Image: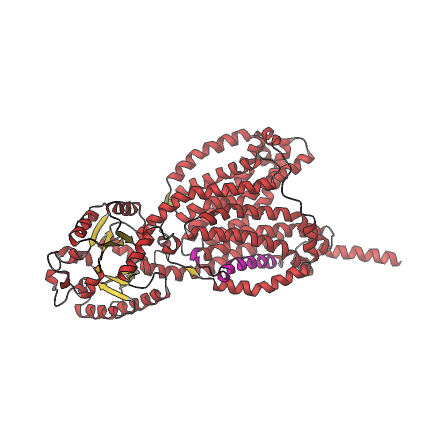
Amino acid sequence: MNKLSNLIVKLRYVILIAAVALLIPSAIGYFNTRVNYDILTYLPKDIETMKGQDILLDQFGTGSFVLYVAEGMEEKDVAKLKSNIENVDHVDKVLWYDSVMDLSVPMEMLPSDVYEAFNSGDATMMFVVFDSGTSEDCTMDAIEEIRKISNKQCFMSGMSAIVTDTKNLAMKETPIYVGIAVLLAVIVLSLTMDSYLIPLFFLLSIGMAIVYNMGSNVFKGEISFITQSLSAVLQLGVTLDYSIFLWHSYQEELEKTSDKNEAMANAITATFQSVIGSSITTVAGFVALCFMSFTLGLDLGVVMAKGVVFGVIGCVTILPSMVLVFDGLIEKTKHKPLMPEFDRLPKFIAKHYLAFFAIFLALIVPALYGNNHTSVYYDLTQTLPDSLESVQGANEVDKNFDMNSAYMLLVDKNLDSASMNQMIKELKNTDGILSVLGADSIVGPAFPKELMPDDLLSDLESDEWKMVLLTTDYKIASDEINEQITKVDSIVKSYDPKAMVVGEAPCTKDLITITDHDFQVVNMVSIGLVFLIIAFVLKSVSLPFILVAVIEFAIFVNMGLPYYTNTTIPFISSVVIGTIQLGATVDYAILMTTRYLNERSSGHDKKEATLIALSTSMKSVIVSALSFFAATFGVGLISSIDMIGSLCMLMARGAIISMFTVLLVLPAMYMLFDKLIMRTTFGLQTEEKEHHHFADMIHRHKVA
């Protein structure tokens, strides 16, 4: 590593030129990486609902649909509006009353449930069907175009409308996230650094690493909007303390030698050795997300693990080069750090360790209970502000038609009419079902099949399947609709075992089942990986249990607080926060424990070792936690998308809770479990024996 460090110092100008040059292909890669705004597409491809979506697209040309409500318009004006919507690119068809019969024929000829599906008071509803997927760019363009040709009394509800609004909001806010994260990071660095200019170089080198990471996503083809929005601030938060460590190492080396190049080479070596251990636990946390069957975890995990690696490389190449090249400017802006030295606090904590351990024991049960009872939501409209058009559209559909959602059935085309009619009858009698719309449900004594237009028949039937649309007054992701979908699935499969229930509501039901399972898997994998890393780094059997227990307690407190504040959080937060907080903050515990072990092996007793470890590590732990807090807190405060805001707020709060837990509870663990730690940590047992043997020899000598 020393040879490499000297080479980095020697090639500092070349490294800086190369670093700037690499920004160009990275920027090109960034702008050519598609962003996916539909999180339901990350469901496993082999589940029935996703297979059904493919059949709808392949055989019916139905990639997605929205519910469109027009209020206070005459029938002829609605017909004209419908015609205009049909002319929008990628609108495959618009189903309305005149799709079933000519406007000259009274609406009353339709079966009552079909009539009520299209009309309520002065409001009428259309089903706008697209030939492209829910979140495809052309679908979102079509939504925008429909909004342009609609008046203020028209509303759209559905996943494609939600995705479009999410895209617009995320594109507007993401630059603000980065800006506020940088601003708060500058404040933290101003408090902790001894130069006004060095924070700028920290942020420049990390910024370059972020651009490389985002640019390299082009090889993935696309990333989720959640990954897009969070990766920059997360990468800043988890890699900022690497830069701080390099700077502190460089300052220490300058006290030993006047040769700045030599000092920097030694600082790079020291930083790399320390940062590798720290970064591995962070990477492990993100790698654990890749084990989710809901592949949004894979998306975020790969990008962030890659981001940490880029951060480490930037910290030991780009930043040292900047510091050496601009050394004169940095020296001119030096000042005394504003953060105070912590002298009395470590003594107070070490002295009252039993009290802090008692608080820890007292909080375990309420923290665990809160963690297990925190409410989560899966309805994507809840993650967006009420002012958005898609949310207003959903409210209008509910207000006028008492309808909260719609989903579809795919049934074998060869199912006989008698079975089909009996199935429709059962479906209509199912709690919460408002209407059952299909070729067989429209046909009746008052409306023979011959009256049905051929194009409508082809819209509802393919060579293999019949499509049936169900409308329901239950909200997506509610217990009621999930029970309803289970019952509907049971009914249709009793008539046709190959039948499928598809659409946003069934997909969301699958999402709930899958992410519940993923939560368990991700937690087990992240704890297992971090446990093994700690065991390897610290060469101990007992310390992995102690350190993981301390950070898991901090996670329980963090995740339990929403229960006690009566806050419902988005499902993705509950799944990923544990592994992110564990991976990013267990470093605090490893840092202090490493110092504790060093002091114990140097011959200090447990009390002295605990006090020294706490005194020397406190500032580093606080700076690390504040860095992570700074990068995420501002985003949590200003984000209009609750899925992003809630996750950032949990991460910011988690960093602070982990900081307090490590500084207050971990020293108590050292004091109480010192004997166990000494006996189960490789290298300490022999030193303890040698220490006792030496003491015994002195005692015998005195007696003699």
**Magenta-highlighted stretch: main secondary structure?**
helix
In the displayed structure image, the side of residue 422 where residue 295 appears, left or right: right
Q: What residue is rendered at 32% in x and 60% in y? A: 505
Image quadrant in which the C terminus is located: bottom right
| Residue 58 percent coordinates (x, y) | 24, 53
| Residue 270 percent coordinates (x, y) | 62, 41
Q: What residue is rendered at 48% in x and 43% in y? A: 180
| Residue 536 percent coordinates (x, y) | 59, 53
3 w.r.t. 367: above or below: above
In the displayed structure image, the side of residue 394 where residue 20 appears, left or right: right
The image quadrant of residue 257 is: top right
| Residue 662 percent coordinates (x, y) | 61, 54
30 w.r.t. 452: above or below: above
Residue 188 visible (yes or no): yes
In the displayed structure image, the side of residue 610 where residue 492 appears, left or right: left
| Residue 412: in magenta span | no
In magenta, the rendered stretch is 544-572
Image quadrant in which the N terminus is located: top right
Q: What residue is rendered at 28% in x and 58% in y? A: 397
419 w.r.t. 621: above or below: below
| Residue 553: in magenta span | yes
Total marks in image: 0
Colouring used for the render: secondary structure
Residue 310 visible (yes or no): no
